[in-house]
Image (spheres, coloured by chain):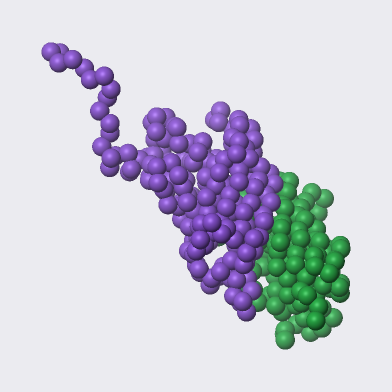
Chain colours: A purple, B green
Amino acid sequence: MSERPPARPRPEPVQVVKQRRDDALAALVAGVPYIRFLGIGFDRRGDELTGVMAYDDKLIGNPILPALHGGATAAFLEVTAIIGLSWAVLWPEIESGAIDPATLAAGRMPRLPKTIDFTIDYLRTGLPRDAYARAQISRSGRRYASVHVEAWQDNRSRPFAQASGHFLMPRRDV
Amino acid sequence: MTSDAMDEDDHPGLGFIRALPHAVALGMTAHAMKDGRAELSMPWSEDLVGDPETGVIHGGAVSALMDTCCGAAAMCHPDAGGSTATLGLRIDYMRAATPGQTIRARAECYHVTRSVAFVRASALDDDDARPVATATGTFTVAPRS
């Protein structure tokens, strides 16, 4: 070779990077029937995920107010915590190519973390409109993880519910 | 109010709990509400699955059942009554619910102040000896006029 090799490999084309990340996220979320049932999706900006629970009449608890059911809110927080935690753990492997999105899409997903305990704070009435949530991984160890998650509707600075919980991490030796 | 004659002894809130759209969507049935105690059940369904490999119900669905059951217990306590909202709820998941089996929840409102109702609950599948989950919750008490 006559040319000097570049100091760094050329960055991958942006479409390739986005496609790989979006495919991995879609595979992670699409496999879970209950997430589909609640109509929860995830917006991705780089490695940051925002859970979106689109409003639906079936999420209502008290129809007189009307307000979101506390159970729907709890489930939304828990789903966001589990997907957020899984995503944070898988991210380096998706980026390094250790996990092939095609394998994920074929349904061979790594197991999801299991909830040990989950504590929900109801701060305000959940209004009959879309809700958003973001998880923050407080600690992620080999066996246990602690996650905090906040949900809001119209104003990011006025959360209507928050939760924290402990999770048992799936074994990675298989 | 309800078509079932056996409900006559039960709290009028039973009809309210049975009509909650989210409880209906999850297939919940309210069996009893009396003196601060409530019993609800939720049959296994494909829609509620959280782990597609095993068919185990998602923790979030169990949370929804626990929240509804605890709220029902708070509503029918003689010193609380009326409408209520969840302030806080903690759930401990002891084991995975057996796929295919109905989950039953029992809640007891064990203390009520002028402002707060304290409730505890457990969830069982067909194995009565080993609860699937337990919960403790605090609920609002409607101000007295």
Which corner quadrant holds the C terminus of chain B? bottom right
**At 64% from the left edge and 47% from the top edge, which residue is drawn?**
A164
**At 61% from the left edge and 76% from the top edge, which residue is drawn?**
A65
In the image: residue A90, left or right of residue B94: left
Q: Position of residue A167 (x, y in %)?
A: 64, 41
**At 55% from the left edge and 47% from the top edge, which residue is drawn?**
A135
Is any atom of residue B143 visible in this view?
yes
| Snapshot quadrant of residue B73 | bottom right
In the image: residue A94, left or right of residue B57: left
Q: Position of residue A142 (x, y in %)?
A: 60, 30
Viewer-proximal residue, B126 or B69? B69
Residue sticking out furthest to the top: A2
Residue sticking out furthest to the left: A2
Q: Where is residue B142 in the image (x, y as percent from the top left)?
A: 76, 74
**At 68% from the left edge and 75% from the top edge, which residue is drawn?**
B18
Q: Position of residue B72 (x, y in %)?
A: 75, 69
In the image: residue A80, left or right of residue B38: left
